Image (spheres, rainbow, N blue to C red):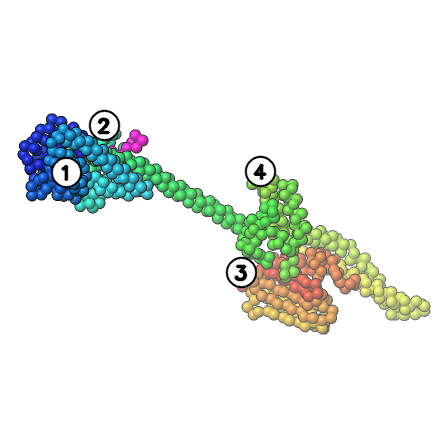
Amino acid sequence: MPAATNSDQNANVLVVDHDIDAREQLRIVFEKAGYRASTVGDATSALRLLQKEPCDLVVIDLALSEVDGLALCKILRAQPSTSKLPLIALSKNEVEGQKLEAFAAGADDYIAKSATAEIVSRSGTHLRAAQREWVLIGSNRELRFLADLGRGLLRTLEPDQLVRRVAGATYEGTSAAMCAAFVSLGEKSEAACVFDREGSAEDSALLQVDRLKSWLTPSTSSSTVPVLISDQRKFFLRDEAHAVEYAAPLRFGGRTKGALIVAFDTREDCDDTVCRLVDAAAQQAALAAHISSLYQAAREASANLTIEVERRTAEVQAQRRFIEAIIDSLPLSLYAIDRNYEIVAWNRNRELGELGIPRGSVIGKNVFGVLTRQKRELLEGEFANVFESGEIQRIEHATAAANSEMKHWLISKIPMWIDRSGDVSHVITIGEEITDRVEANRAVARAEKLAAIGRLAAGVVHEINNPLATISACAEALESRVSEGEFKESAALDDLREYLGLIRSEAFRCKMITNGLLDFSRTRTTEHALVNLADVISSATRLLWHQQRGEKVEFQIYTPEDLPPISGDAGQLQQAVIALATNAIDAMPDGGVLRIASRRIGSNVLVEVSDTGVGIPQGNITKIFEPFFTTKEIGKGTGLGLAVCYGILTEHGGSLDVQSTWGVGTTFTISLPAINNDGEPQT
C-alpha cells in the first residue's frame, strides 16, 4: 500500500526486526514521540502488512533472518506502491561497506540500532521530506490534470463534447469508480455523459437527472457548494456498489450551469486531494459551459441574423425584380447613365426592335460608344444640360427605318438625385414612340383642312360654273359663225379660229377643275353593298389598258380567289384605284412595273399599288394628300386626285398609307375592313 501521507506527528511507522526486545523498544520510543507504530519480525510479514495497511516510513534491521534487510529494501523499491516509501536501515555495528550496500539497496538512511533517539529524530526528518514530496507530487498531478483538461476544453464549444471531455478526464484523473458531467444551458440545450465502471461513455440513463436538477435549482442552498454524499438514497448515479459520491456544481457568474459527480467505492478513495481535483475540474467546466452558452447564443443569433438577412435579401431581390418588371413592361425605351456617362440601366424595350442592343452588352459601358448613330456633340450637350440645370429636357425627332418608314419619337431626359442635397447623380432617358399620335394629329389637321377646302370649293364651283358656261357658249357660237363663213373677209380669220380654240379648251379645263372640286367637296351618300375588290381591280386595270395609259409599263396583278368581300361603293373604290394607278404610271415616264396586289391581313383587306418610278421626296410625304399639291408639271395635274382618294377611303372606314424611297419607287396601301356575306365585320 502507498504511504498514508499523514503529518509527521500522526505518521504510521513500521519496525522490521527479528529481535523482539529491540523492536518493542523502538515501538515504545516512536509512540512516545507521537507516532503510530507497528512491528513485525521478518520480511515476509512486513510485505504482507504493507499490502493491507498504509505506512509512512519503514525501519529495517539489516540482520533479518531468511530474507535480510538489504533484500527487503530492494523489494520495496521495486514495487510501485512502495517505491517512494522512506526506508531507514539499522545496523548493530556500523560498518563502512555495509552502509554503502544499504544505500545501494535503496535505503534513505543508515543508523546504528543503539541510537534510538537519533532514529526517531532522523525518521521525523525523512517523514517531513516525504510529506513535502507527496504534496509536490499531488500538486504536479493536479496541475498536469488541469492543464490537460484546459487544453481539451479550449477546443470544446458544443455541450455534448464538453460533458464527455470533462467526465472522461475526471474519471481518469481521480481513478473513480464512475463519473458524470451534466450541463444545462437552457431548456433546449442540455447534455449529460456518464463514464461507467468499464470506462465506457454512456448517456443520461445512469444519471438521476430529475434529482440532480432539483439539487441545482436556485432555491436549494446546498447547490452552491460541493457536497460529499454517503447516503445511497440521495445518490445521483444509478449504481449500488459505490460508497460515496462527490458532487461539485458548475457555477460561473453567480449562475449554476450544471454539475460534476464522481463516485468512489470507499471513503478513503475520496481524499482531500481528489476533492480539490474535482473542484478545479468543475471550475474549468463551468467556464467552458459559459463559453459554450455564449457560443450557442452567438450561433443562434447568427442563424437568426442569417435568416433575417436572407429574408431581407429575398425581399429586396423580389422588390428589385418587381421594379425591373415594371420598367421592362413599360411601352417605353429607357436607359440611365451616371456622371461618368456610363450606362447603369437598360430596359427590355431597349433590347427590342431594329436598334435593340442586349442589356448585358451595354451595362457599364460609355453611352457614346453604344449610341453611335447619334452625333456625340449633340448627345453630350443634351446630357450636360440636364446634369447642370437639373431640369427635364424633352425633344421630338424623327428617324427613318430600313423600309424608309418614318418613326417619330419623344425623348425625355430626366434628372435623378441619390441625395437631394447634392448634384444630379444620374440622367434617365425615356424614348416614347409617338408615330401614331403624330399621324393622328396630322390626320385630324388634314381632315379639318380638307373640310374647310371642301366648303370653299363648293362655293367656288357654284360661282365659277355659270361664267364658264357663258364663256363656253359664246366661244361655240363664234366658232359656228366662223364655220358658216361670216368672217371670210376678215384678215384675222386664222387668229380668230386659234383664239376660239384656246378659249374652248381652257374653259373645258376649268370645267374639269371645278368638277374635281365638286367631287372633292361632295358628301357621298351612296348606299354601300358587298364589293369584291378583285372585280374592282380587274375592271380598273381594263379601263387603264383601253385608255392606252403607260404603254411602256408592265402590269402585274395579284388577287387571291378567297379574298373576303368589303362593304362599299364599287364605283368610288374603282375611282380610287384608277387614281393611284394613274399616278404610278405618271411616275414611270420611261417605263417600269405597275404592281397591284390584294391580300387579307387579320380582319382587313389590303390593296397595294406599287411602282418602280422616281419615288416621292421624304419632305413631300406629309403633303401629298393635301388638295392642289402636285409634283407634276403645270397642266398635267390638279393636285386633287390623292385628296379625293383619301376622302373616299376614309368614308369607307379604311385608310391610305404610303411608303416611298427616292429613286426606287412608291407603294400606296389601301386598308379596308373585311365583312362576312351577311354584312357583319369579320374578326
The answer to whether residue 127 is above or below residue 520 is: above
From mark 1 to mark 2, how far is it between C-alphas? 66 Å
> Picture coordinates of residue 679 (x, y %)?
55, 61
* Disc 2 residue crowd, few under 14, some 14–19, many 20+, Cα 10 Å: few
In this picture, which residue range is highlighted in magenta? 249-255
Residue tagged 1: 95
Looking at the image, which residue is at 59% across and 43% down? 425
From mark 2 to mark 4, how far is it between C-alphas? 65 Å
Kindly identify the amino acid type of the residue bearing the numbered disc 4: Arg
From mark 3 to mark 2, how far is it between C-alphas? 97 Å
Q: Residue furthest left?
A: 20
The answer to whether residue 525 is above or below residue 122 is: below
Q: Is residue 253 magenta?
A: yes
Q: Earlier in the sequence, mark 3 or mark 2?
A: 2
Q: Earlier in the sequence, mark 1 or mark 4?
A: 1
* Disc 3 residue crowd, few under 14, some 14–19, many 20+, Cα 10 Å: some
Secondary structure, mark 2, is: helix
Kindly identify the amino acid type of the residue bearing the numbered disc 3: Gln
Q: Evaluate whether residue 131 shows in this view.
A: no
